[in-house]
Image (cartoon, rainbow, N blue to C red):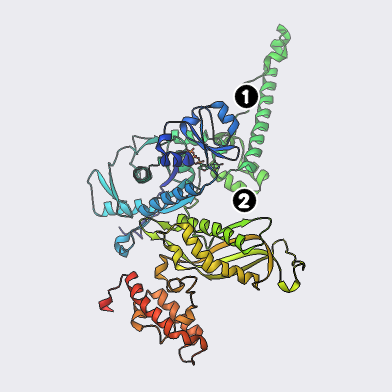
Amino acid sequence: MSLDTLPPQPRAIIQLDLDYFYAQAEEVRDPSLKGKPIAIQQKHIVVTCNYEARSFGIGKLALLTEAVKLCPSLVIIDGSDISRYRRWSRQIFELVLGIMTPKEGASKEEEGPSAAVEKLGMDELFIDCSEIIRTHSIRRQTGQDESNPVRFELPSGDEFFYLTGSYAEGHMIGTPPAFAETPQTSYLQIASHIAAFLRGRIFSETGFTSSAGVGHSKLFAKLAAGARKPNAQTCLLAGEAASKFFDDMTLRKIPGIGSAVRKPLQSEVDRLMQELREIEEEDQRIKFGALASISGLDDGTLKSDSLHPPAATVGVVRSLISQQRLEEMFGSKLATQVHSLLQGHDPSPIVAAALPQQISIEDSFPHCTSLQEISDRLKDLAAQLLERLQEEEWNLRRGWRRHARSVRLTGRLRKASAAEGATGSMRRAWNDDRETRSSPMPVDVWDVDKPATARASVLVEGTLLPLFNKLLGSPDSRFDCTLLNIAATNFATGSASKDIRTFFAASADNPAPPPEEILKADEVDPEFLAALPADIRAEIVAAQQRAGITKRPKTPSEANAGRTSKRVKASHIVMLELLGLNMTNN
Ligand code: TTP
Ligand code: MG
């Protein structure tokens, strides 16, 4: 049997959700908090709290004053700076991604499929295990491997063993004993072991507990994950119990049904229930009419209270509201989606999020009129930007995932030149009168051994202040700046040292010449060129062609050629070492 000729197989999706995330991050930082009720405060709200605090009746998004009333011993922690939570979030995502993706350098044959991982918000991940389970099952069948326990190899090469025919890991909702008899259930069973492996690895590497759900769709995986928390996992199988679990869900819990749909549906349920009640009461009146006239009973005693309007659960809505009525209420497109969700159909794929094209930090303020103030503000913003880049793109084990090759400064400015005199009025700024200048990102900013503040100073002194002066136009302009934005742009994969343009984009006192200037054919050692990765080599050749400089006479700027050339040649050695190439062979 070949992979290509196989019919489509069932899906197995895991949803992972970190428990009481912000509050748990504080417990991981300070283990002495464990066991105490703690709440994370943002403004006047408790954005989350640990389960000790929840046992006092405090919920997510409770008012702080209410929370303290419920639990006077509540430990309140300021969570307005979310950068530390973002760091954990990124680290845990990278960890899971690393396990679900083949290791770099694996050959195409041994690589196998990877599992798509989608990050949703700070603490939620969806993982599509269908392909890796499918490949595993085919290998077992073709290899006629009947060993039990069975070895499961994850894309990273990590492994675990599971027992066939046994129950799933964690809790189950559905039909257990016939388990693993159909491909559907066996997929879910294996996915439950993968979920347990991932949760175990997250805990051993970071100290965070999490909860997981396993199901055939994102919808079922998410609902299953919510069934038991914290530090638990649930597998939603087929059968009566699973149908009941789904039918009893209130619409509020169904992702994809927002309040714009939920509220009209609840009203519709209320209206239909009221009609039913009236019909039932009328029915009873007719039945007991004769009896009442004989016995003198009051009609009021016949009022039925057996039909209270129920909460709009999936099952209630499905049984009371037809697809046609849904179309009248919401139009055909939305009605089809809602109808499909109410049937438990959710084919939506797991989408690995695209990486952002740029990462920027911005601040606005009423006035800023001196270069010293601009420098201070830029240093503050640059330090935040570098921290953010590190959070997003740096991994302790793998180094930089990407680096930005350019930095862009945007300012909102009112300007007046000195020629207009001290009393000259400044040119009025329009509401969004922004100007922008870009420059190569200096390589020093990627040196994570240095503190972000020191690297920020280099970035400001060497690159951003010169850019700001360009925004001003003339150095003795008076100005009033009301907004600054610094953006890291033009990302390339891997570490900055592999990129020739940033490598040469050195520092303030040694500003980077454009590629056209440093990459003249007669100055670049052909062996060095040949040793570079293909994409960088192509860029150099393209730069040479763009500039058309190989044959033209020397310009005044080329008077510096000796200096540039020396730097290029000295850099060859470092560059080759960085690229891991053996000098003696080149
Ligand atoms: P959740 O996963 O909703 O909550 P949680 O992880 O704190 O708790 P649970 O154990 O129930 O999963 O949200 C993740 C984090 O997002 C949460 O720790 C705090 C933050 N958050 C907000 O900033 N605003 C909000 O409105 C909510 C609900 C959460
Ligand atoms: Mg959570």
Residue 463 at x, y percent in the picture: 53, 68
Q: Secondary structure at mark 1?
A: loop
Quick one: quadrant of the C terminus? bottom left
Decide which of 544, 224 is in the foreground and name it.
544
Q: Which residue is most to the top?
A: 295
Q: Is residue 67 left or right of residue 393?
A: right
Residue at figure coordinates x 72%, y 11% from the top left: 298
Label 1 beta carbon within 8 A of ligand 1:
no
Q: Which mark is residue 333?
A: 2
Q: Which mark is residue 117?
A: none
Placement of 315 over or under 100, stated as above or below: above
Task: Provide residue 378's location: percent of width, then percent of height.
Answer: 57, 60
- 503 versus 141 height, above or below: below
Residue at 64 percent across and 72 percent down: it is 475
* Ligand 1 within 8 Å of the CB at mark 2: no
In the current view of this chain or complex, which residue is farthest to the front? 422
| Quadrant in the picture for the N terminus | bottom left
What type is the residue that disc 1 sits on?
Answer: Leu
Taking depth in this image into account, of 558 and 207 the one nearest to the observer is 558
- In the rendered image, residue 59, in percent from the top left (x then y), is placed at 54, 33
Taking the image as drawn, is residue 299 in sight? yes
Q: Quadrant of residue 472?
A: bottom right
Rounded to the nearest angstrom, the CA distance separating label 2 from label 1 is: 32 Å
Amino acid under label 2? Answer: Lys
161, 28: nearer the viewer: 28
Q: Residue at x 49, y 60 (%)?
A: 355
Q: Is residue 335 above or below residue 533?
A: above
Query: Does label 2 or label 1 sit earlier along the sequence?
Result: 1
The answer to whether marks 2 and 1 mark residues whose Cβ atoms lie closer than 8 Å is no
Q: Rate crowding at label 1 as few (under 14), some (14 to 19) or many (20 or more) other CA atoms within 10 Å.
A: few
Foreground: 570 or 244?
570
Q: Which residue is mark 1?
A: 307
